[in-house]
Image (cartoon, rainbow, N blue to C red):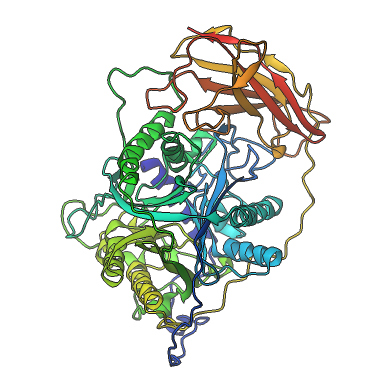
Amino acid sequence: MSSMRTRLAALWIATAALACEGPLAGTDAGADAETDAFVLPPRTREQLPAPGPLVAGVAQVRIPAPLGIGTMGYAAFGEDPSVTPFSEMFPGTVRAHGVLTFRAVALSRGDAFEVIFVRMDTVGVFQQLREAVLDELEERTGRRLDDALILAGNHTHSGPGRMLMATGALTALGDTFFPEFYDGIVDALADVVEQAIADQAPAELGTAMAQSSEGHSDRRCENDPLPQPQEIADLPLIAVRREGRVDAIVASYAYHGTVLGIGDLTLSGDMGAVVEQQIEERFDHPVMVLFFNSWGADMAPGSVSPDPGATGADLPSGFERMRLLGDVIAGATLPLLDTLTYDAEPIVRARTYRVRLDREVIGYPEGTFSYPHGGAFCGIGGEGSCEAIEPVDGLDGRCLPIGRRENLPKQTMLTAGTVGGLAFVTAPGEWSTALADGVLDRVREVSGGDAMLIGYANDYTGYSVNEADWWQGGYEASGALWGPLQGEYLAARLREAFETFHDRWNEPPWLEPARVEPFGGYTYDAYVPETPVGLGTVEVDVAASASATDVVSFTVLGGDPWLGLPLATLERDDGAGGFTPVTRSNGTAVTSESYDFWLDLVPDPPYVAGERPAERTFRWTIHFPVSHRARSGIGPLTGGRYRFSVRIPSASGESAVQTGAFTVE
């Protein structure tokens, strides 16, 4: 955590140096804000059609992120360079841990009765991206899915950057904008939604509230003296059943999915994606799991020790921790599935609301948080009191300003909905436990049932904590983009949003701003993949035998990472002269798309900024641990011979190659 705070403090020092405005002075306050008084029009009630039968669909699409792109979540100040064609300011990644995905579960009982959950292996989502996806879906389908669509990042800091169209200091959040990659992101998100809708079939669902305090830990000491909850074990889930068996699980938990660091140079879905796999492996058939991050402003991933007698291969730093956390969450959630009552006619409905977010509408008095375009990291890494309630005097005057040219949107969006017996709301960023629980208390009171919050959803506004917590200082509190009252302002609007939704008002008790326009106005020359050397050659084969604690590795010569990762499938000798894919307990093949593998890329000659040789050798080394100390759905590899079959993407099509065979002792 200390290294992360240092990097982000450096980021906002750069922001201060580059921003063209400082604190407000005199009559400059809010010069471009909507400050005129307004009168709300009379509110009217929704007139809804009759709902139809429940249908549900699932889909998964790879994120088109080339290995080599920089990550997003940590600032890159002080990091060693790692040059690739796909990264500019940030160190380029050299390792892939599993494959990054978008996952969708689309529920519908007809128009006005739809919810589409999309989990993203990203640090978050910006409202401009959501608007672009809505535009693309409307062009494809003729429908505007604004109310139904929930886009939420699992907050991996090892997901791709270069998705934010920003200038100046904000490029330090996730590198410069990469328009061709961004267009691919928009298309892939539209694809996963469209495919989930196309997959819809008759369904029923049930809801439950699991509990786990082992999967996370309280990381913020400054709010410990405050009379508020520091940790909540709630883990709400929605189970979707088709043809009599569970097809999908949607869950939300406060975990802050950041086990890996920027220096690991790894693309990974991190804790959230690994938890999904660990849950899925407990079934005897394929199941789609979406594991959302609810609130994370004062949470960290938990730390779980393996059983003392467990044996397995040594893994790169953090990989085993993620798997063990997956075991904990699976153990907390799956027993509840046997207790569920499934409903074929559940409530399925959502509404999305846009709300102003700026200094004036929050209501700061003159002289308090005097930053017209937002500010953050008030106190620049200074620690607050962890022993007593001691507000930091003048903290709101020591913020680093965000400049006008950074074009930070002065609005955000909130969604309220109900799925079966579970009410839900979304938060645009990282909320603290106490702030989120205050909203959920109201949601539970109004709905009369359990409630779920999905964080990092539909937009990103930084950290949100309650006012007393903000004045305690420290890293988490200082991450609010609109100061000490941001959290309580957004919490009040979110309570009102759910009340508006529940009572079926057409209008919230505020005037909604027009939508933010998607990023646009950019052009680019399409990236041309480099010519590979020796495509399809197994340069270093597997060892002839391996023990249970070994990592089996081999190197193939592949193609430009822009075209995707090689896909390795583990196969077993069938005793009849051939090999067949090894499957997990849930019936899916064991491939390098999973978090059982990792891939390392070494280009030869190495990447050098501004240089492009006539051809290049791309050495892909694929690693597979024979066994794990954490639970695995693969089971022990004993008896018989194994090999890997590898599909390698290239500009001229796909190549296939097999390794030699190996035995497991």
Give 171 or 112, whichever is nearer the viewer.
Answer: 112
Q: How far across and down, in percent of the image, does residue 539 sit?
A: 70, 15
- Left or right? Give the position of 68 relative to 114: right
As drawn, the residue found furthest toward the front would be: 244
Q: Is residue 400 visible?
A: no
Quadrant assignment, res 448:
bottom left
Quadrant where the N terminus lies? top left
Residue at 79% x, 24% y is 533
Q: Nearer the viewer, residue 388 or 193?
A: 193
Q: Above or below — where is 497 with respect to 657?
A: below
Q: Looking at this view, is 180 or 307 the one in front?
A: 307
Q: What residue is rendered at 45% in x and 92% in y?
A: 41
Q: Quadrant of residue 456?
A: bottom left
Residue 268 at least partly seen:
yes
190 up-or-down from 654: above or below: below
Q: Quadrant of residue 27?
A: bottom left
Q: Is residue 112 above or below residue 612?
A: below
**Residue shown at the point (52%, 66%) measured from the top left:** 148
Q: Nearer the viewer, residue 74 or 148?
A: 148
| Residue 400, image x, y percentages | 43, 62
Instruction: From the top left corner, tell me how far across and down residue 640 is, in percent.
Output: 54, 9
What is the x, y in percent for residue 639?
A: 50, 9
